[in-house]
Amino acid sequence: MNVGQPLPPCPIWDLKHSEAKLREAQTDPFTWSHGYRLESVTPGERKFPSFEKCVQTGLMAAELAARRMPVYVGVDLAGKKRKGNAIFALGLDANLRRCPVEIRCGAWSSPDTVRNLAEVVANHDVRFIQVENNGYQQALVDWIKESKQDFWMKVESFTTGSNKTDLDVGLPALEVEFYNEGWIIPGGEFEGHPPACACDWCRFRDEFVNYPKGTSTDVVMAAWICRDAASKWAPKRSTPFKGRNFSRR
């Protein structure tokens, strides 16, 4: 090739990204800009800009769990094209603020998923467990119930769809709760960790801070499924949240 001559045309995307698929992606400006043009997410594009308002510096999840609050669990299961699983356990304090007490992530087999779920249930006063059941995932939900684990009667199925974007019960409702300081997030679980830390709590923080641009969304989905369970079966609030401070007394 002679110096100064233009390079021959060649595709910059994998061949599975046909021109038709790329033009289809262009109809969603966010996906096109960030997923294909690799533009960074600006503060105004973040879906959960109020997440940090609820982070309490130095607070550990064990301090929250020690209160033996009623706990609700959400489980985001792997799909045929996605290997990750996530279990999210959320306690409710006396003011019904949402308090994450345990998070587990992993590319588990079905028996490993059930084992991890059983350990989470043993660690807390779990009232209900809501498990994603889209597609073949329902088979695992059925297996949990049929296996007669000690917690099988607490398991309910949860189907995701248009409800994900619903302003009252979908992901936007999480941001409303963050904005109103309705969560108590134990910052001590991820503060001071290396930037590349991939522990479950750092993944929790990173997914919420970067959503929907992050490399994974399993914990966000598990948290949403969990929050939905608490909203369905926990007592209802009659007054606004009363601040975020967690009393250690």
Image (cartoon, rainbow, N blue to C red):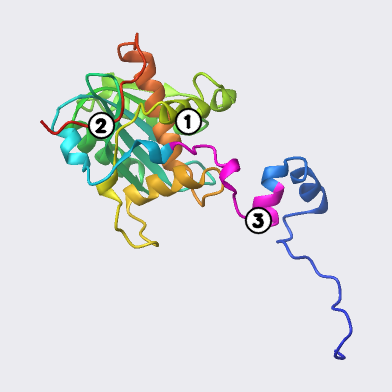
Q: Which residue range is magenta in the image?
A: 32-50
Residue 167: which quarter of the image? top right
Three-letter amino acid code at the position of disc 2: Asn
In the image, is 56 to the left or to the right of 7? left
| 109 shown above or below 148 | below
* x, y percent for residue 33: 70, 50
Q: Which mark is residue 115?
A: none
Nearest to N terminus: mark 3 or mark 1: 3
Name the foreground residue: 104 vs 44: 44
Label 1: which residue? 175
Three-letter amino acid code at the position of disc 3: Glu
Name the foreground residue: 11 vs 34: 34
User: Is residue 39 on the magenta stretch?
Assistant: yes
Secondary structure beneath dot 2 equals loop
3 and 2 marks in contact (CB < 8 Å): no
Q: Mark 3 packing: few (<14 Cα in 10 Å), some, or many (20+)?
A: few
Three-letter amino acid code at the position of disc 1: Glu
| 134 shown above or below 216 | above
Label 3: which residue? 39
User: CA separation, marks 2 and 1?
Assistant: 18 Å
* x, y percent for residue 218: 44, 42
User: Is residue 28 on the magenta stretch?
Assistant: no
Residue 13: which quarter of the image? bottom right
Nearest to N terminus: mark 3 or mark 2: 3
User: CA separation, marks 3 and 2?
Assistant: 36 Å
Label 2: which residue? 245
Q: Nearer the viewer, mark 3 or mark 2?
A: 2
From where the camera sits, is residue 201 visible?
Answer: yes
